[in-house]
Amino acid sequence: APVPATLAVAKVLATAEAEAIWRAGTGIFIDVLPHAPKPQNLPAGTVWREKPRLNIPGSIWLPDTGYGSLAAVTEDYLRQGLDHASKGDKANLLVFYCQEDCWMSWNAAKRALALGYRNVAWYPQGTDGWQRSDLPVAESQPQPRE
């Protein structure tokens, strides 16, 4: 199904608005794109080259936290990641994104609201819209799991 155009209680950002927040440093950008694991059944001697994730510089990458339903361990990872990113302040602006037309960021933003975060924004164009506007990206690694 198509991704909704809105998310109740969250602000929906266009690229120019996301860029302004990023340049001012007034928001914490949360990337929720899934992280592809190394296939377990690779034949011996096969070289595995992980595809790098290019995201909005300074983002916290919390992969796999935007699926429709989450395992308890992944919910804990999201909760801990948001607490770390926000420094425990649920009033800090969190900007969720993934790729364009991706339910993951919508789902993760909705979860943040359910966790009590009061200043949530959703950037539905994600890295696709960001790069179309010739804005910088940086190679990223997932936030470590505790």
Image: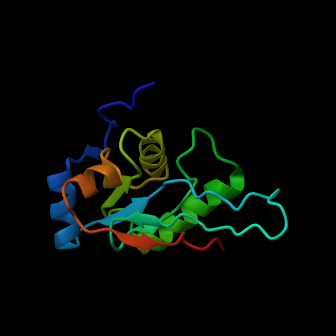
Q: Is residue 122 visible?
A: no
The foreground one among 87 and 68 is 68
Residue 65 location (% of width, % of height): 56, 53
Residue 98 location (% of width, % of height): 41, 51
Q: Residue at x 38, y 52 (%)?
A: 97
- In the image, taking residue 113 as reference, residue 57 lies left or right, namely left
The foreground one among 117 and 62 is 62
- In the image, taking residue 86 as reference, residue 93 lies left or right, namely left
Q: Residue at x 26, y 56 (%)?
A: 130
Q: Residue at x 32, y 50 (%)?
A: 128
Q: Quadrant of residue 3?
A: top left
Residue 112 location (% of width, % of height): 45, 52
Coloration mode: rainbow
Residue 16 location (% of width, % of height): 14, 54
The foreground one among 43 and 40 is 43
Q: Please say if 125 is above or below 131.
A: above
Give the total of numbered labels. Answer: 0
Q: Residue at x 32, y 44 (%)?
A: 124
Q: Quadrant of residue 25?
A: bottom left
Viewport quadrant of the C terminus? bottom right
Q: Is residue 99 visible?
A: yes
Q: Please say if 101 is above or below 13.
A: above
